[in-house]
């Protein structure tokens, strides 16, 4: 149980730290270029997750037989 609490705390701290870093970068860098980078990351990540989920689901279908 303690490991679960530590993992949760580390996750929350990590999220807040990277949100603060991103917030500061938005003011320091040109917004249009940074927006393109974040958009590319978001789209690439979501497409990758979709295909990995699709592969996992397809692999799981073999257990129906």
Image (cartoon, rainbow, N blue to C red):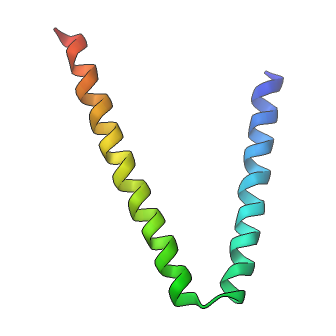
The percent coordinates of residue 36 (x first, y second) are 46, 79
The percent coordinates of residue 8 (x first, y second) are 74, 39
Q: Residue at x 68, y 73 (%)?
A: 22
In the picture as drawn, the residue positioned furthest to the left comes out as 65
The percent coordinates of residue 21 (x first, y second) are 75, 71
Q: Is residue 50 left or right of residue 24?
A: left
Q: Quadrant of the C terminus?
A: top left
Q: Residue at x 75, y 80 (%)?
A: 24
Residue 15 drawn above or below residue 31: above
Q: Residue at x 72, y 63 (%)?
A: 18
In the picture as drawn, the residue positioned furthest to the top comes out as 65
Q: Nearer the viewer, residue 55 or 4?
A: 55
Q: Is residue 45 left or right of residue 65?
A: right
Q: Nearer the viewer, residue 46 or 6?
A: 46
Residue 4 drawn above or below residue 54: above
Q: Quadrant of the N terminus?
A: top right
Residue 30 drawn above or below residue 23: below
Label total for image: 0
In which image quadrant can residue 52 be found?
Answer: top left
Q: Residue at x 79, y 26 (%)?
A: 3
Q: Is residue 6 left or right of residue 61?
A: right
């Amino acid at each position: 149980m303690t490991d679960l609490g530590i993992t949760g705390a580390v996750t929350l701290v990590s999220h807040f730290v990277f949100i603060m870093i991103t917030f500061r970068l938005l003011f320091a860098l040109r917004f249009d270029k940074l927006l393109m980078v974040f958009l590319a990351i978001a789209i690439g990540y979501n497409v990758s997750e979709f295909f990995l989920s699709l592969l996992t689901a397809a692999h799981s279908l073999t257990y129906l037989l």
